[in-house]
């Protein structure tokens, strides 16, 4: 069997490392259709968050542009005051227009506005981990965006800074500017490299995984279930039958076995699917399983 650590440490060489269990929860799916508006079933959304924490999950991913502000408010309502070991990770660098489009919000002033909004809606004095989401090659250089983030880190508003939706070149640039704690890119069994979406290109996790491993940086895959399963093919279905599991569970297990530096955050708006996702952490894939999956 592959060795699969149960925990992962964020910013392991810093003065304030954060160790979390190696399966988190992404809140994006808690919103309404098209990641906009309130959830269809608000009581279930709150119960999902409470159940996740009750079962030992202690890493939650959110953003103030989910909803907008819907997931942050749900997290605060369901979980505040927060357990001491809970790490809440948010994202800045983007916003939503009334037509539901995704656009950059990444000037230093924009980023400060987003951080202050996240602090307010999450009811926190400091955000433990913030991902700067890159929205293509816009007019604001990466150096300027990260400079504003490091300024707020020095002010104590942010503990650790990560990058999201980054190419290998952008990650290398970021590493040259300051400590990068985590990377959040699209990644799944079936979707490993760059994919074009309506709001732009999303670099894949495979393109940066080895660099993350070299620097001890956790890679946090997003959209791993949404974009992975329709293209997964027969092999993941065969392994799912072998382990009496769903294809979604095998996708999560594959990520956990692929590298000890991967921290999956599968999201769902269903309490039943949450329990299935949590069970995936117990699936032990053999070296033969992993070789067959490729």
Image (cartoon, rainbow, N blue to C red):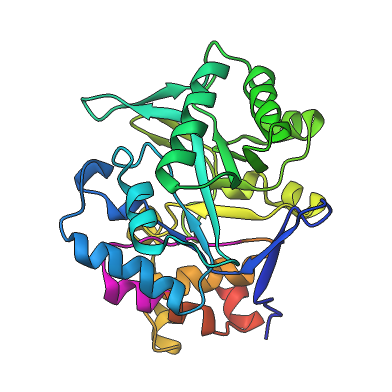
Q: Position of residue 122 (x, y in %)?
A: 44, 47
Residue at position x 29%, y 64% in the image: 46
Q: Position of residue 67 (x, y in %)?
A: 29, 41
The front one of 102 and 42 is 42
Q: Which residue lies most toward the top here? A: 139
Residue at position x 43%, y 60% in the image: 80
Q: How many marks?
A: 0
Residue 273 included in the magenta stretch of the image? yes
Residue at position x 31%, y 73% in the image: 273
Q: Is residue 123 left or right of residue 184?
A: left
Determine if residue 260 is in view. Answer: no
Q: Position of residue 275 (x, y in %)?
A: 36, 78
Determine if residue 39 is in view. Answer: yes
Q: Which residues are magenta?
A: 263-277
Vertical relation: 262 (above or below) 89 = below
Q: Is residue 135 left or right of residue 233?
A: right
Vertical relation: 294 (above or below) 122 = below
Vertical relation: 259 (above or below) 150 = below
The front one of 140 and 124 is 124
Vertical relation: 175 (above or below) 128 = above
Residue 248 included in the magenta stretch of the image? no
Q: Position of residue 265 (x, y in %)?
A: 48, 60
Q: Residue 141: name its quadrant.
A: top right
The front one of 126 and 181 is 126
Image quadrant occupied by the C terminus:
bottom right
């Amino acid at each position: 069997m592959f060795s699969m650590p149960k925990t992962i440490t964020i910013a392991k060489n810093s003065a304030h490392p954060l160790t979390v269990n190696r399966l988190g929860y992404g809140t994006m799916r808690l919103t309404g259709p098209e990641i906009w508006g309130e959830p269809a079933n608000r009581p279930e959304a709150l119960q999902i968050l409470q159940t996740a924490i009750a079962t030992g999950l202690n890493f939650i991913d959110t953003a103030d542009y989910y909803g907008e502000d819907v997931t942050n408010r749900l997290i605060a309502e369901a979980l505040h005051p927060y357990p001491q070991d809970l790490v809440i990770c948010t994202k800045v660098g983007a916003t939503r227009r009334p037509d539901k489009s995704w656009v950059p919000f990444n000037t230093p002033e924009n980023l400060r506005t987003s951080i202050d909004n996240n602090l307010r809606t999450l009811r926190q004095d400091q955000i433990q981990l913030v991902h700067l989401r890159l929205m293509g090659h816009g007019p604001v250089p990466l150096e300027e965006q990260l400079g504003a983030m490091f300024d707020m880190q020095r002010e104590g508003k942010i503990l650790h800074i990560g990058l999201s939706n980054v190419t290998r070149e952008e990650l290398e640039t970021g590493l040259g500017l300051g400590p990068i704690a985590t990377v959040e890119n699209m990644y799944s069994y079936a979707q490993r490299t760059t994919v074009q979406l309506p709001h732009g290109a999303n670099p894949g996790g495979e393109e940066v995984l080895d660099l993350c491993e070299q620097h001890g940086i956790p890679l946090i895959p997003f959209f791993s279930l949404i974009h992975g399963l329709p293209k997964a093919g027969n092999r993941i279905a065969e392994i799912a039958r072998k382990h009496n599991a769903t294809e979604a569970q095998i996708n999560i297990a594959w990520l956990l076995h692929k590298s000890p530096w991967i921290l999956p955050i599968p999201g769902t708006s269903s309490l039943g699917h949450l329990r299935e996702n949590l069970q995936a952490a117990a699936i032990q894939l053999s070296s033969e399983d992993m070789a067959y999956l490729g």
